[in-house]
């Protein structure tokens, strides 16, 4: 709609207008430019949240997966595993709020081929 209004104004200017009409048209164009800038900044603001959502989504997926394991086999719900799940939820929260050192960091990928985690000494 705004683009159409801008084109109409341009057409009038090309046909030639009186100085008083020109001033009025310039004011209209300034208003439209301001509206367009607001719309663009709103759009960019919404798009800026996507990495935060993606980050949170990945951490929450890990927490949900772990929770499902605990539901299927309650013996796996050790205190350490519950703390791990809580950590994952906190990291998701940090992604959204932009707090903490985990901001923007995706969870580590699972090793392929069923490799087991090695401890700090490589065992």
Image (spheres, rainbow, N blue to C red):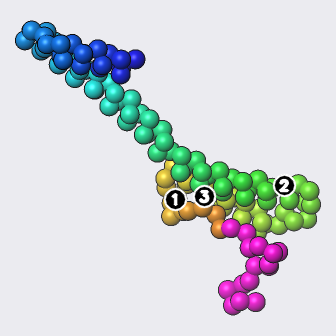
Give the residue at mark 2.
Answer: 68
- Region of the chain picked out in magenta, as a range: 109-123
Quarter holding the N terminus is top left
Q: What element carries label 1?
A: loop
State the mark number for residue 103.
Answer: 1
The answer to which quarter of the image holds residue 9 is top left
Residue 104 or residue 10, whichever sits in front: 10
Q: Is mark 2 on a helix, strand or loop?
A: helix
Q: Earlier in the sequence, mark 1 or mark 3?
A: 3
Q: Which mark is residue 50?
A: none
Binning the other alpha carbons within 10 Å of mark 3 as few (below 14), some (14 to 19) or many (20 upward) gives many
Is residue 28 depicted above or below 35 in this figure? above
Crowdedness of circle 1 by 10 Å Cα count: few (<14), some, many (20+)?
Answer: some
Q: Which residue lies furthest to the front in this view?
A: 15
User: Is residue 2 found left or right of 104 in the rendered image?
Assistant: left
Residue at 38% across / 34% down in the picture?
A: 40
Marks 2 and 1 sit apart, C-alpha to C-alpha, by 25 Å
The single residue placed furthest to the left in the displayed view is 19
Q: Position of residue 62 (x, y in %)?
A: 72, 58
Q: Name the residue under label 3.
A: 91
Query: Is 21 on the left-hand or right-hand side of 97?
Result: left
């Amino acid at each position: 709609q705004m683009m159409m209004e801008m084109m109409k104004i341009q057409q009038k200017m090309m046909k030639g207008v009186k100085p008083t009409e020109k001033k009025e048209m310039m004011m209209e164009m300034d208003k439209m430019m301001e509206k367009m800038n607001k719309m663009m900044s709103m759009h960019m603001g919404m798009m800026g949240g996507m990495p935060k959502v993606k980050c949170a989504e990945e951490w929450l997926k890990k927490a949900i997966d772990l929770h499902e394991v605990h539901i299927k086999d309650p013996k796996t719900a050790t205190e350490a595993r519950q703390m791990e799940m809580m950590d994952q939820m906190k990291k998701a929260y940090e992604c959204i709020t932009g707090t903490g050192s985990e901001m923007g960091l995706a969870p580590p990928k699972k090793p392929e081929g069923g490799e087991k985690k090695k401890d700090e000494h490589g065992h």
